[in-house]
Each structure stands twice: as structure tokens, then as C-alpha cells.
Image: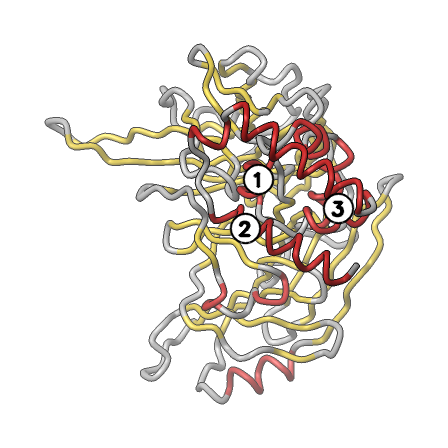
């Protein structure tokens, strides 16, 4: 059985290298290939077939859908989609205006970063949810004069080379935005803060245009620091009138709520970050300066915070960075994935042999060790991305995901 599984996996690998052409979809070859697939699937247990297939790249799985009708049914099932998504979690981020992804164990190794198929020279910021990414592209176009010409584009970062663009914006938006994709009805929404009156707008794919939220918050959102969607909720870490708030917007009902946090968010010597972890909202605090404490909490059901990390990084960071002559720095968290906390270090006083004003380093909560310093990480928009088999396409001028 082991020998047969190896042969079958080899067959898949060979097929993965082939580009689909007319001969692949001819009725005779389709019939012959279908018989082979049915025969193979009848020998191996369904659990083993699924286990083998979920280890393949998104592009290969999309290609296998045309191999046979039984496989098209299997690979299009909600059960397989959920299993594949839960088994393929990576960090997705921007670096020098290019999009990359990396596994948790390789987040501190830039040589292992992999570029996504989709790239754009004017890629500014990004958000992702349920395996679909939304990017903000800002261009300066010379047309007798310089002007800003921005637009959003949507697609699967692991399967699509070309994303689908929305109409160009007729209003100014802030760099940080929220993106929500519902895999059940395959609709998406984009939440942005506008530069006018600190108000919010939503792009609703079900109607194909921008509109105001059905309910506006009772306060102004001056500067959103982070936005991330978890489940049906978009969380916004932002500045309010006098202090920072953590807000929650139900993306279905569009009801706003202020979320009480386990720590105050107003310490200027601390950094704060929110992202998804274990299908929950994760709040990370690093600092204050010179007392580098790292805390992380998960917002569980019932809106209760559970602390999942409490680490004293003071001596570790000063010892590691001190070897490079770095003693005046500001530490902030980018992502907490698996056992790895990715930390961004802003060097306030650059030294000659450390060419960059910012470096990266990771902390392993399992063994309480720091990695070597990562020079020039220049990471932004770091998100946890669950792989998806959905792709975006345009039909009659509107974007559809399926």
C-alpha cells in the first residue's frame, strides 16, 4: 500500500507539471482519465485521498478539478474546502511593495519567503479574509499634471496572477482598511475610513458600489491603526477623541460595538497589534520601552479575554541587540503565529555597521529564545492567511468569487 501511495503521488506530481491544453479536455481522454481516477480512488480510503490532496498547492487543486467528474465533485465540496483551509495557514505580508507568503516556521528566514503570483508596482496596502486578499493600489499618473489615482483589487493570492480591479476611487481613503469575504454566499465588503469628516464607507459586492454603513458609529474614527476581520466581525483598533478604542463592526448586520480590552491602549511607550489567531481576535502588547514585556490575549466566545502569552523580553532583546550596538529602540509586534512572535525593531540611533533603521527578530514562546536579527524586513500589512480554493473573476463588469 505504501509503494502504491508513492506511485500515485508521483503521478500527481507529473500531472501538476503539465499545462492544460485541448487534448486534456477531449472527450476520449477525459473518459480514459476519469476511469483511472475512479479506479485509484476506489483503492485508497477517502481519508487518505483527502490527506494527499490537501498537501498540494492551490493551483494544482484547481487544475485537478477538470481531471474527472468525481474529483470535481470532491474538490468542490464544502468539506474539502474547509479541510484544505484549516490545513494550510500561512502568513501573508507586503515587503517593499511586493506580496509574499511564508510558513510559521520560516517567518524569520527571508530566503524562504515566496512571492505570490499577483504583483503590482504600486501595491500600497492589503487585507485578507478567508483566503481572499484585497489590495489598495495607489498610482501617481502624469497626465499634464500629477494626481492620485487609487483603486482596490481582489483575488486569491495563492492561485491568481491577475486580480480583479474595482472602479477607480472618486474620494480619498485611508491606507488601513478592512476586508470581509463570506464563503457561504461568496459576497465581500470593503470597509474604509474616508478623509472627509472621519466617516466610513463600505463597498458592497452584492450591489457593486460604495455606500454608507447601515449604522454609523457614535464617534469619529480619526486614525485606524489596524483592521482585521475574524468570522463575521471587522475589528478596528483606532484613535478616538481622547483615547484609542477597539471597535467591532458586525459585517452582516453592520452594528457597531466598543470592545473592552484587558489592558489600556493609551500607553505611548507600548505598541499594540490585532490579528486573527485560532479563529479568534488576538490582541498583542509589547512594551513599555526599556521594559519589554510581551502579552497576547484571545477574545473568546462570550467576549472574554484569555491570556495566551506573557513573556519578559527585556534582557533577551537588550543582550541580542546590544551585540550590534543597538540600545535605543522601539519594539512592536507584527504577528503571533504558532509558537512564533514576529517582532519589528525600530532602531532610533542607527550605527555604521547596521545599515537599516529597522530590523526584525522572532521570539519562540516554546523555548523562550530569540532568533538572529533579520536585516531590512520592511514588512507591512502582515496577515494570517487561510488558503482558499475560491478565485475572483469579472462577469458583466462585476466581480464574482467562486
Identify which residue, 146 or 247, lies in the foreground: 146
Identify which residue, 368 or 98, lies in the foreground: 98
**How many residues crowd mark 2 within 10 Å: few (<14), some (14–19), many (20+)?**
many
**x 52%, y 47%: residue:** 16
Image vertical order of residue 160 relative to residue 192, above or below:
below
Rounded to the nearest angstrom, the CA distance separating label 2 from label 3 is: 28 Å
- Name the residue beneath numbered marker 2: 92
**How many residues crowd mark 1 within 10 Å: few (<14), some (14–19), many (20+)?**
many
Name the spot of residue 32 as percent of width and height, x first. Answer: 61, 32
- Name the residue beneath numbered marker 3: 49
Image vertical order of residue 5 relative to residue 120, above or below:
below
- Contact check, label 2 and label 1, Cβ < 8 Å: yes
**x 42%, y 60%: residue:** 378
**How many residues crowd mark 3 within 10 Å: few (<14), some (14–19), many (20+)?**
some
User: Which callout, 2 or 3, points at the residue further toward the start of the chain?
Assistant: 3
Badge 3 element: helix
Amino acid at each position: 500500500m505504501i509503494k502504491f501511495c508513492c506511485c500515485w503521488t508521483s503521478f500527481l506530481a507529473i500531472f501538476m507539471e503539465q499545462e492544460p491544453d485541448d487534448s486534456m479536455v477531449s472527450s476520449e481522454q477525459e473518459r480514459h482519465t476519469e476511469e483511472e481516477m475512479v479506479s485509484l480512488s476506489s483503492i485508497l480510503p477517502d481519508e487518505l485521498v483527502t490527506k494527499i490532496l490537501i498537501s498540494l498547492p492551490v493551483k494544482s487543486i484547481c487544475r485537478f478539478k477538470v481531471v474527472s467528474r468525481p474529483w470535481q465533485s470532491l474538490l468542490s465540496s464544502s468539506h474539502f474546502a474547509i479541510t484544505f483551509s484549516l490545513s494550510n495557514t500561512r502568513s501573508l505580508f507586503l515587503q517593499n511593495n511586493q506580496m509574499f507568503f511564508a510558513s510559521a516556521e520560516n517567518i524569520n528566514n527571508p530566503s524562504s519567503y515566496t512571492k505570490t503570483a499577483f504583483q503590482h508596482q504600486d501595491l500600497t496596502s492589503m487585507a485578507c479574509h478567508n483566503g481572499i486578499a484585497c489590495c489598495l493600489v495607489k498610482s501617481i499618473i502624469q497626465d499634464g499634471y500629477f494626481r492620485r489615482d487609487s483603486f482596490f483589487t481582489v483575488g486569491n493570492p495563492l492561485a491568481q496572477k491577475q486580480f480583479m480591479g474595482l472602479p477607480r476611487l472618486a474620494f480619498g481613503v485611508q491606507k488601513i482598511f478592512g476586508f470581509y469575504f463570506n464563503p457561504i454566499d461568496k459576497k465581500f465588503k470593503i470597509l474604509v475610513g474616508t478623509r472627509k469628516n472621519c466617516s466610513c464607507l463600505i463597498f458592497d459586492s452584492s450591489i457593486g458600489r460604495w455606500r454608507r454603513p447601515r449604522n454609523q458609529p457614535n464617534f469619529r474614527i480619526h486614525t485606524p491603526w489596524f483592521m482585521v476581520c475574524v468570522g463575521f466581525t471587522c475589528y478596528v483598533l483606532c484613535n478616538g477623541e481622547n483615547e484609542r478604542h477597539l471597535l467591532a463592526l458586525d459585517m452582516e448586520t453592520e452594528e457597531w460595538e466598543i470592545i473592552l480590552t484587558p489592558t489600556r491602549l493609551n500607553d505611548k511607550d507600548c505598541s499594540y497589534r490585532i490579528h486573527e489567531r485560532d479563529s479568534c481576535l488576538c490582541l498583542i502588547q509589547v512594551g513599555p520601552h526599556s521594559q519589554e514585556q510581551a502579552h497576547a490575549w484571545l477574545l473568546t466566545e462570550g467576549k472574554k479575554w484569555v491570556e495566551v502569552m506573557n513573556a519578559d523580553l527585556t534582557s533577551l532583546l537588550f543582550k541580542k541587540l546590544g551585540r550590534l550596538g543597538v540600545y535605543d529602540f522601539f519594539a512592536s509586534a507584527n504577528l503571533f503565529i504558532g509558537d512564533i512572535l514576529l517582532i519589528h525593531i525600530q532602531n532610533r540611533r542607527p550605527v555604521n555597521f547596521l545599515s537599516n533603521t529597522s530590523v526584525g527578530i522572532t521570539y519562540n514562546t516554546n523555548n523562550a529564545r530569540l532568533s538572529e536579527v533579520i536585516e531590512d524586513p520592511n514588512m507591512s500589512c502582515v496577515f494570517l492567511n487561510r488558503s482558499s480554493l475560491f478565485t475572483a473573476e469579472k462577469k458583466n463588469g462585476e466581480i464574482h468569487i467562486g
